[in-house]
Structure formats: C-alpha cells, structure tokens
Image (cartoon, grey):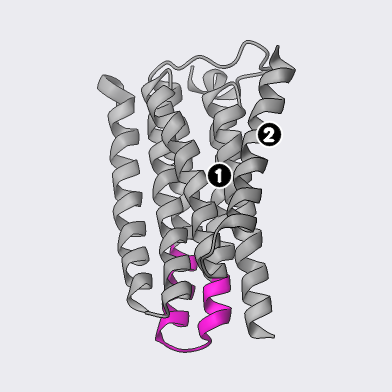
C-alpha cells in the first residue's frame, strides 16, 4: 500500500517535470519560459521528494527529504525572481504579442 | 508547418515513453529515472540553443532542480539514504550559483 502511494506521487512529480521541460522548449519568450519551468519545482521535484518521504517514513532519509522540500520551496521563487530581474535589466525584449510591461513603468 | 512540427515532437516524446515502458527489462523505479533523463535532454537542448544568455541561465536553474529529483529517485531505487545528502548539497550549490548568474546578467548597472 505504501509502495503504491509513493510510486503514484513519484509518477505525478515526473509528469510535471516533463511538462515543465516541454514548456521550456515550447514557449516563445524568456519570461514565459521562466513561468512555465517554475512548475518543475513546486509539483515536480517536491512531489518526487514527498514520494521519497512516504517510502522511507520517519527515518533519517525521510526527514532529510522533508528538509530538502522546505529548502527548495523557500529558495526557488527567490532565484526565479532574481533571474527575471536580471534579464529585464540586461535588456532582453519581451515577446511582440505581450500586452503590458509594468516593471519598466515602475523603474522609470 | 507549425502544426506538423508540434505533432512530430508529441509523437517523439510518446514513442520514447512507450519504448521505455514496454520494451526495457529493468525494475520499475529505474524506469522512472529513465523518464527523468528525457527532461535532462530537453533542458540541455534549451541550454545549447538559447538566443540570449538569460535563457541559458534559466536552463541551468531547471537542470539543478532536476538533479535533485534524480537523486531522490536513485535513493528510492537503490535503498541507500546518502543520495538525499547529495540532493541537499546540490540544492544549496545550485541556489547560490543561480543568484551569482543573475547578478552577472545585470551587468554594469547594478547599484544595490
């Protein structure tokens, strides 16, 4: 029963990783790519590590997997925000069908 | 033309998934690790092809996240617990590396 549950969580995580990487290939713009590939983090890798925690229980490996989940959830939005800010400041253009750019208005 | 490219990519990914699931003679959890290798391949394509340096930085970030998940799958399939230690160390190193890349992207005009 525990094996079935943890394998289901790991399969959900791997499918979200696959969809995020397809979005990394498919999207037209760097900001769209960043938004699509940030889905790899919260449901992809955290789903896999949650499956590892269910598999090992409250042993050393399971608690370390929980610590890794907390660390990833805290740090992944920070790195994504820093990348978007750096790309916008280095002068990467938006896609030509983008509607509005509020960061440029707020900087000036 | 665009629809044909979309259909070809979808058929390629579906063919790899069916081929790994049906015809390979390895245990089930190692098959899951092989599925994750497709994700590594896609992010490497973006890393080689990206038009701007920021695209390569995004691909590097996602590559680090995928390595953490791969370490989790290796820990499940082999039953050894020290793969999770590698995952935690890789998470720290990847976070600091991506922050350094983002500061490098800002170039001359970072002032805070």
The quadrant where residue A68 appears: bottom left
Image label count:
2
Q: Nearer the viewer, residue A105 or B90?
A: B90
Q: Which residues are magenta?
A: A50-71
Label the magenta part by its dominant secondary structure: helix
Residue drawn 49% across the image and 59% down it: B33
- Dot 2 crowding, Cα within 10 Å, few <14, some 14–19, many 20+: few
Question: Which residue corresponds to the image point at 45% horizontal and 89% vertical from the top-left?
Answer: A59
Q: Is residue A85 visible?
A: no
| Rendered residue at 34%/42% (across/down) | B98
Residue B14 on image: x %, y %: 67, 42
Q: Is label 2 or label 1 in front? A: 2
What label sits on residue B10 in the rendered view?
A: 2
Secondary structure beneath label 2: helix
The location of residue A104, given as percent across then percent down, is: 53, 19
The chain that hosts pointer 1 is A
**Whether marks 2 and 1 lie on the same chain:** no
Q: Is residue B21 above or below residue A66?
A: above
Identify the image quadrant of the N terminus of chain B. top right
User: Which class describes the residues within 10 Å of circle 1: few (<14), some (14-19), or many (20+)?
Assistant: many
User: Is residue B25 found left or right of A67 in the rendered image?
Assistant: right
Secondary structure beneath dot 1 equals: loop
Residue B44 placement (x, y as % from top left):
41, 36
Residue placed under numbered mark 1 in the picture: A38
Task: Examine the rendered structure and indicate whether residue B87 appears above or below residue B39.
Answer: below
């Amino acid at each position: 029963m525990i094996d079935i549950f943890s394998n289901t969580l790991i399969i959900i995580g791997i499918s979200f990783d696959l969809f995020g990487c397809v979005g990394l290939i498919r999207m037209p713009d760097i900001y769209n790519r960043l938004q699509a590939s940030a889905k790899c983090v919260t449901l992809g890798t955290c789903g896999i590590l949650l499956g590892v925690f269910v598999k090992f229980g409250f042993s050393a490996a399971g608690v370390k997997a929980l610590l890794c989940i907390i660390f990833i959830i805290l740090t992944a939005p920070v790195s994504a925000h820093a990348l978007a800010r750096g790309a916008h400041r280095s002068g990467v253009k938006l896609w030509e069908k983008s509607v509005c750019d509020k960061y440029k208005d707020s900087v000036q | 033309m665009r629809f044909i490219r979309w259909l070809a990519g979808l058929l390629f990914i579906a063919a790899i998934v069916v081929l790994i699931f049906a015809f390979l003679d390895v245990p089930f959890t190692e098959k899951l690790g092989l599925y994750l290798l497709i994700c590594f391949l896609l992010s490497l394509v973006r890393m080689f092809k990206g038009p701007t340096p920021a695209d390569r930085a995004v691909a590097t970030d996602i590559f680090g996240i995928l390595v953490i998940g791969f370490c989790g799958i290796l820990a499940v399939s082999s039953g050894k617990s020290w793969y999770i230690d590698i995952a935690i160390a890789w998470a720290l190193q990847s976070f600091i590396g991506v922050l350094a890349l983002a500061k490098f992207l800002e170039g001359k005009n970072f002032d805070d």
